[in-house]
Image (spheres, rainbow, N blue to C red):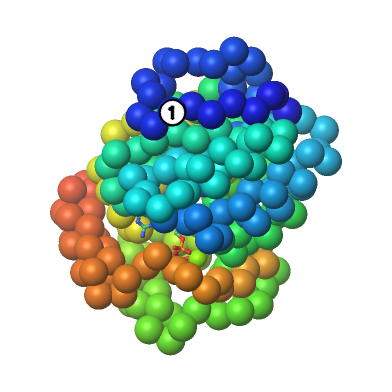
Amino acid sequence: MHSPHTERRDAPPTASPPGSLSTVDLELVIPAYNEERRLARTLLALADHLRQLPLRSALRVIDNGSSDRTAECADRIAARGVPVTVTGCSRRGKGAAVARGMVTSRARWVGFCDADLATPAAAVDDALALLQDGHQVVIGSRRCHGAELKVRQPLVRRLGGAGFRLLTRRLSGPIADTQCGFKFFEAGAARRIFADITTVGFAFDLEVIARARALGLALQEFPVAWSDQEGSSFRPLTDGRRVARDLWRLHRSLAGFQPVPEAAR
Ligand SMILES: Nc1nc2c(ncn2[C@@H]2O[C@H](COP(=O)(O)OP(=O)(O)O)[C@@H](O)[C@H]2O)c(=O)[nH]1
Ligand SMILES: [Mg+2]
């Protein structure tokens, strides 16, 4: 892992620090909006796990205009020798934060996970094995064979999720769980997917998958053990309405969407 460094808010992506991320094999992006309470434990658990892997890795928090001490929390962890940087993102929304991390990464492989570590750090190993096998887009899933749901979401989220899946079958295709916040990419694939992404809120994962399929990239879903965590930033009314609007927009904008058949890749 390279030495700790903190990139300041909204620094241009070209502001490459000494010992920059270009020397990193795997970068893990954590979108964070007002996460001062959940972030430290997550960063330490991820760093502990990554340290044991035989590759160079780093963590990057995308601070999504937090009004609490999220950035300072990451700085404190960096001061303890953990390779974590902070990048600002003035545009609100989880999708905007993840996209900023993806398009500015210089690592060979890049992934993202939530600040609450609902998917444990050990799942990184499965993602890496698939990337090393040549899969370009690797999708953590709570709904494929072998997945484990240790703590389920509240009923209202489960109902919303069922509706979401019903409405998004055409775009998600064979992917059973588009919304688990644990996805990894070969860097070139990530840049192609995220360069022009239009969804900045929670529905962005669906656009990621639709775009990856349309680009003919090699997608692979893999099972994770997942536990719902307290302190979700998803507001069912506000964010639910926004997701519904995004779905409507995506269905129209991707009306001519055609996945590239596997044989043509
Ligand atoms: N609500 C919200 N979350 C954001 C935003 N930017 C980044 N995030 C992060 O997206 C992740 C979503 O996880 P969480 O709040 O647990 O949502 P849930 O697991 O879907 O209930 C967390 O790491 C948030 O900090 C934003 O603008 N709004
Ligand atoms: Mg969560």
Residue 207 shown left or right of residue 127 in the figure: left
Q: Nearer the viewer, residue 77 or 159?
A: 77
> In the rendering, at what x and y percent does residue 153 appear?
50, 79
Q: Count of labels shown?
A: 1
Q: Residue at x 63, y 36 (%)?
A: 78
> In the rendering, at what x and y percent does residue 39 appear?
56, 54
Q: Residue at x 45, y 61 (%)?
A: 179
> In the rendering, at what x and y percent does residue 89 appear?
35, 38
Can you tell which quarter of the image residue 55 is in?
top right
Q: Residue at x 48, y 70 (%)?
A: 231
Position of 236 relative to 213 (above/below): below
Position of 8 relative to 204 (above/below): above
Q: Residues within 10 Å of mark 1 (few under 14, many from 20)?
A: some
* Mark 1: secondary structure: loop
> In the rendering, at what x and y percent does residue 176 appear?
50, 65
Q: Residue at x 33, y 45 (%)?
A: 65
Q: Nearer the viewer, residue 122 or 8?
A: 8
Q: Amino acid at mark 1?
A: Arg
Q: Do we see residue 166 in this rendering?
A: no
Which quadrant: the N terminus? top right
Q: Do we see residue 54 in this rendering?
A: yes
- Name of the residue lying farthest toward the bottom: 155
Q: Nearer the viewer, residue 125 or 115?
A: 115
Residue 128 shown left or right of residue 27 in the figure: right
Residue 13 shown left or right of residue 184 in the figure: left
Position of 8 relative to 180 (above/below): above
Task: Name the residue tied to disc 1.
Answer: 8
Q: Nearer the viewer, residue 172 or 248?
A: 248
Q: Is mark 1 within 8 Å of ligand 1?
A: no
Residue 203 shown left or right of residue 54 in the figure: left
